[in-house]
Structures are given as structure tokens and as C-alpha cells.
């Protein structure tokens, strides 16, 4: 159902609040996370594989690995997994 109605924008932002906390991110990194929030707001859930497709690759052709550390990419994927798990539990 969530994939039909999307996710509340506030909830989508909250899902990535821990990721953003305490980090100094560059413009491309912030835009990348904003695109994730936009996608979740529209579609409700998102698979990690989409991080390597357009519109994400329009910012960084190699996907998140080009602008985030490997541990930060793992954090992004974990946040997406938490959103998906919450959607399945609802």
C-alpha cells in the first residue's frame, strides 16, 4: 500500500536524520540524500539498487560510492532497509 501512496515527507526525512547527524556533507551529498527522500515520499520504499540508476547517477555517475565513504553507503542502505521493514510491518 505504501508504494501506492508514498511516505510522509517528514517520516522520510526522519529515516535519514541519524545518517545526517554530525556529518558535514557537500552539496552533491546533500542533493543525493534529498533525492532519496523525494523518492520515498513519492513511492514509499526504495531498493538500494536504485542508488546506481538515474536520477542518482545524474549527480554522480558511479552512484553513492563516488561521493560517500563505504561506511556511509552502508548507513544509507541500512536506512533504506529500515524504511522497507517498517513498510512491510505496517
Image: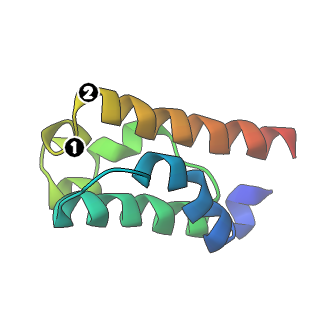
Q: Are marks 1 and 2 in contact (CB under 8 Å)?
A: no
Place of residue 66 in the rendered image (x, y in percent of width and height, measured from the top left):
13, 40
Q: How many marks?
A: 2
Place of residue 55 in the rendered image (x, y in percent of width and height, measured from the top left):
28, 61
Residue at (41, 53) in percent of width and height: 20
Describe the element under mark 1 as helix, strand or loop: helix
Depicted 21 relative to depicted 62: above or below? below
Residue at the front extreme, as displayed: 22
Q: Which residue is mark 1?
A: 63
Looking at the rendered image, the disc whose residue lies closer to the viewer, 1 or 2, is: 2
- Residue 55 shows in this picture: no
Residue at (16, 45) in percent of width and height: 67
Q: Cα distance, mark 1 to mark 2?
A: 12 Å
Q: Quadrant of residue 27?
A: bottom left
Describe the element under mark 2 as helix, strand or loop: helix
Residue at (39, 45) in percent of width and height: 50
Depicted 42 relative to depicted 56: above or below? below
Task: Report the quarter where the N terminus lies.
Answer: bottom right
Amino acid at each position: 500500500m505504501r508504494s501506492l501512496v508514498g511516505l510522509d515527507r517528514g517520516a522520510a526525512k526522519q529515516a535519514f536524520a541519524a545518517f545526517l547527524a554530525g556529518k558535514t556533507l557537500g552539496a552533491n551529498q546533500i542533493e543525493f540524500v534529498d533525492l532519496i527522500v523525494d523518492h520515498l515520499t513519492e513511492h514509499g520504499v526504495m531498493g538500494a539498487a536504485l542508488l546506481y540508476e538515474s536520477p542518482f547517477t545524474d549527480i554522480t555517475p558511479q552512484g553513492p560510492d563516488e561521493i560517500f565513504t563505504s561506511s556511509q553507503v552502508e548507513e544509507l542502505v541500512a536506512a533504506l532497509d529500515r524504511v522497507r521493514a517498517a513498510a512491510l510491518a505496517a
